[in-house]
Image (cartoon, rainbow, N blue to C red):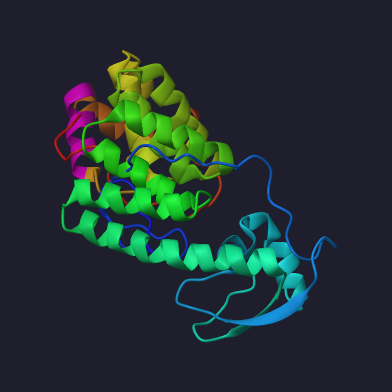
């Protein structure tokens, strides 16, 4: 399953991305309040089904498909005698305790995924309007399909509809508040809509969730410069280059850094010690992949 993150990219499982930068509007995450009751709570008659693991699946993604929430990953892992982070190989068998509601939910998700996959194919081909139609249909079938809502928001952003993207991504973030990709995407939509301060706040929040998130690091530097915080912007560009010397916007960042500070100043900046670089990551994290700004943008 593919998730369209930022501007182009290829899947990574339940949260896969497609090298695109798309988000489209209008996900009525109906009934997305609290997580639904899932089997194991004593509320349903339990039976066991065997799930065959597909590429990239995890206990979290499987739990989301059957139970409608990744919060059930621990319960599902425990039912299989392992920790929630235990890696699952393609073709492995996972026992899934289910009730009637869970089976019906999984059937809806399976049907919705077929439309979702068509949407990612259209997006990859640049057929953005068709992609939004497929993501909307996936959401109609399964209103709790967060990745479909996320991709819909991204595609809307790619289509130059930041207000619609904000409306969509706001709803998605309410369901997944700790997802750095979603926080970043909402920030990008806000920034594109002209709210630089709100965009910057979201980029910084994304970095608290994923310290080395490439798009958020670069976007933070751009937003700082855009609002006139030149010195902090310079240090943020330097922080980005330290972590992503061959990143998607490395050349753009280097050029901008030299324009702002001059080559000699950049060398002094790199040689200096004792000043913390604003936003410089201090813990390891897996950076995202994709593109919030077109190459050549400051």
Between 1 and 86, the one nearer to me in the picture = 1
Query: Does any portion of residue 191 appear in the rendered image?
Result: yes
Magenta-span inclusion, residue 259: yes
Where on the picture, by quarter, is residue 257? top left
Magenta-span inclusion, residue 161: no
Image height of 59 relative to 72, above or below: below
Where on the picture, by quarter, is residue 37? bottom right
Q: Is residue 250 left or right of residue 135?
A: left
Residue 215 image position (x, y, % from top left): 35, 42
Residue 163 image position (x, y, % from top left): 33, 26
Query: Which stretch did the figure color magenta?
Result: 251-260
Between 85 and 193, the one nearer to me in the picture = 193
Residue 90 image position (x, y, % from top left): 49, 83
Residue 238 image position (x, y, % from top left): 34, 35
Query: Does any portion of residue 243 appear in the rendered image?
Result: no
Where on the picture, by quarter, is residue 197? top left
Point out the residue furthest to the top here: 228
Image height of 9 relative to 291, above or below: below
- What quarter of the picture does the C terminus occupy? top left
Image height of 63 relative to 205, above or below: below
- What quarter of the picture does the N terminus occupy? bottom left
Give the residue displayed 68% in from the left and 48% down from the top. Answer: 35
Give the residue displayed 21% in from the left and 37% down from the top. Answer: 159
Between 94 and 248, the one nearer to me in the picture = 94
């Amino acid at each position: 399953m593919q998730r369209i993150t930022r501007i182009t990219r290829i899947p990574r499982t339940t949260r896969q991305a497609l090298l695109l930068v798309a988000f489209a509007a209008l996900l009525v995450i109906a009934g997305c309040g609290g997580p639904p009751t899932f089997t194991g709570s004593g509320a349903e008659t339990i039976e066991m089904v065997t799930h065959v693991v597909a590429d990239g699946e995890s206990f979290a993604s499987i739990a989301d498909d059957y139970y409608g929430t990744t919060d059930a990953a621990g319960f599902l892992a425990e039912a299989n005698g392992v920790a929630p982070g235990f890696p699952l190989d393609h073709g492995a068998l996972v026992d899934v305790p289910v009730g009637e509601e869970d089976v019906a939910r999984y059937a809806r998700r399976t049907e919705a995924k077929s439309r979702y996959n068509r949407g990612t194919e259209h997006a990859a081909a640049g057929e953005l309007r068709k992609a939004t139609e497929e993501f909307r249909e996936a959401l109609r079938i399964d209103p709790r399909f967060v990745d479909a809502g996320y991709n819909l928001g991204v595609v809307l952003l790619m289509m130059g509809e930041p207000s619609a993207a904000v409306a969509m991504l706001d709803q998605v973030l309410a369901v997944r508040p700790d997802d750095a990709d979603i926080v970043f995407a909402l920030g990008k939509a806000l920034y594109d809509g002209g709210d630089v301060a709100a965009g910057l706040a979201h980029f910084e929040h994304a970095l608290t969730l994923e310290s080395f998130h490439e798009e958020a690091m670069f976007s933070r530097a751009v937003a700082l410069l855009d609002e006139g915080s030149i010195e902090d912007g310079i240090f943020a560009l330097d922080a980005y280059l330290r972590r992503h010397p061959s990143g998607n916007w490395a050349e753009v960042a280097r050029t901008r850094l030299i324009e702002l500070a001059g080559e000699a100043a950049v060398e002094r900046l790199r040689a200096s010690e004792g000043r913390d670089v604003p936003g410089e990551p201090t813990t390891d994290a897996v950076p995202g992949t994709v593109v919030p700004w077109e190459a050549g943008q400051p």
